[in-house]
Image: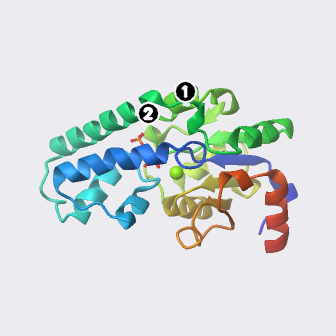
């Protein structure tokens, strides 16, 4: 594994890493799945994490063997409905929706002059950053609408390193989703997974909670794995 001293930048996923919004994405899709008559399962829910809006809809339709039942126009309407559901759910969001330890970690990164960037597939990221008063930490945000491929493709994390003017091996990516870890690893960056050992087994470093993401813990984990 890369040496901790070579790390110059941190590239963050948003939903499920910085904020609890992953829960609202799931609830919003669950409502659509119910409308479509597609059974909502834990594996479908986990598989959707990190996946772009239209790719998520395709996954849900596939899970219900309905991938050929809707026209492009109908799919665009369904995706727009999901976004309406999502926006309604985040309407009352406030700083209590921030995951534990994240503001402290961002402050610490700034204090140590690390570069910081956001690599979320969500087109709603700018609104969320504003609502949570975090925009000042993220001068660099990858624009997901400019990407050719979504996670698990490495493109979004490669673009993140480019925005920071860093080499991939100088960056750490942080994710709560298997698709995101695959994207970080494919980009040649060091991956930190937040969550379940089995789901995120491909992560270079795993923490069970965002509370554990500190520079000291990351340095220790990179030494152990070296
Ligand atoms: C993130 C979330 C996904 C969501 C995707 C697109 O990656 O983890 O659950 O589908 O962003 O979000 P958007 O807000 O653009 O629909
Ligand atoms: Mg996520």
Q: Residues within 10 Å of mark 2 (few under 14, many from 20)?
A: some
User: Is residue 226 or residue 21 the one in the foreground?
Assistant: 21
Total labels drawn: 2
Residue 23: x and y, percent? Answer: 45, 48
Up/down of 96 relative to 71, above or below: above
Q: Which residue is mark 2?
A: 90
Answer left or right for 91 relative to 198. Answer: left
Q: Residue at x 59, y 35 (%)?
A: 96
Give the farthest residue toward the front. Answer: 96
Residue 222: x and y, percent? Answer: 80, 66
Up/down of 112 relative to 68, above or below: above
Q: Residue at x 84, y 38 (%)?
A: 113
Q: Which residue is mark 1?
A: 131
Question: Does residue 212 appear anywhere in the picture?
Answer: yes
The span from disc 2 to disc 1 (Cα, nearest Å) is: 9 Å
User: Is residue 164 or residue 32 the one in the foreground?
Assistant: 32
- CB atoms at circles 2 and 1 under 8 Å apart? yes
Q: Residue at x 34, y 53 (%)?
A: 55
**Residue 91 circle label:** none
Up/down of 75 relative to 143, above or below: below
Element under disc 1: helix
Q: Which comes sooner in the sequence, label 2 or label 1?
A: 2
Answer left or right for 179 relative to 85. Answer: right
Q: Residue at x 81, y 40 (%)?
A: 108
Residue 88, picture quadrant: top left
The colour mode here is: rainbow
């Amino acid at each position: 594994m890369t040496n901790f001293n070579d790390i110059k930048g941190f590239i963050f996923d948003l939903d499920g890493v910085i904020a609890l919004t992953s829960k609202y994405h799931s609830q919003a899709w669950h409502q659509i799945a119910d409308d479509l008559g597609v059974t909502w399962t834990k594996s479908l829910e986990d598989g959707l994490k990190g996946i772009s809006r239209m790719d998520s809809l395709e996954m849900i339709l596939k899970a219900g063997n309905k991938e050929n039942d809707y026209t492009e126009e109908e799919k665009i309407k369904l995706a727009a409905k999901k976004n309406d559901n999502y926006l309604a759910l985040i309407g009352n969001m406030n700083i209590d929706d921030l995951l534990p330890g994240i503001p402290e970690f961002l402050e610490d990164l700034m204090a140590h002059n690390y570069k910081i960037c956001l690599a979320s597939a969500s087109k709603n990221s700018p609104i969320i950053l504003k609502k949570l008063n975090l925009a000042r930490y993220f001068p660099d945000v990858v624009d997901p609408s400019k990407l050719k491929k979504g996670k698990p493709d490495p493109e979004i994390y490669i673009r993140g390193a480019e925005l920071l003017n860093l080499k991939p091996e100088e960056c750490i990516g942080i994710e709560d989703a298997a698709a995101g870890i695959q994207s970080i690893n494919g980009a040649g960056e060091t991956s930190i997974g937040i969550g379940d050992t089995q789901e995120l087994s491909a992560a270079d470093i795993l923490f069970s909670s965002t509370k554990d993401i500190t520079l000291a813990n990351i340095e220790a984990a990179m030494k152990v794995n070296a």
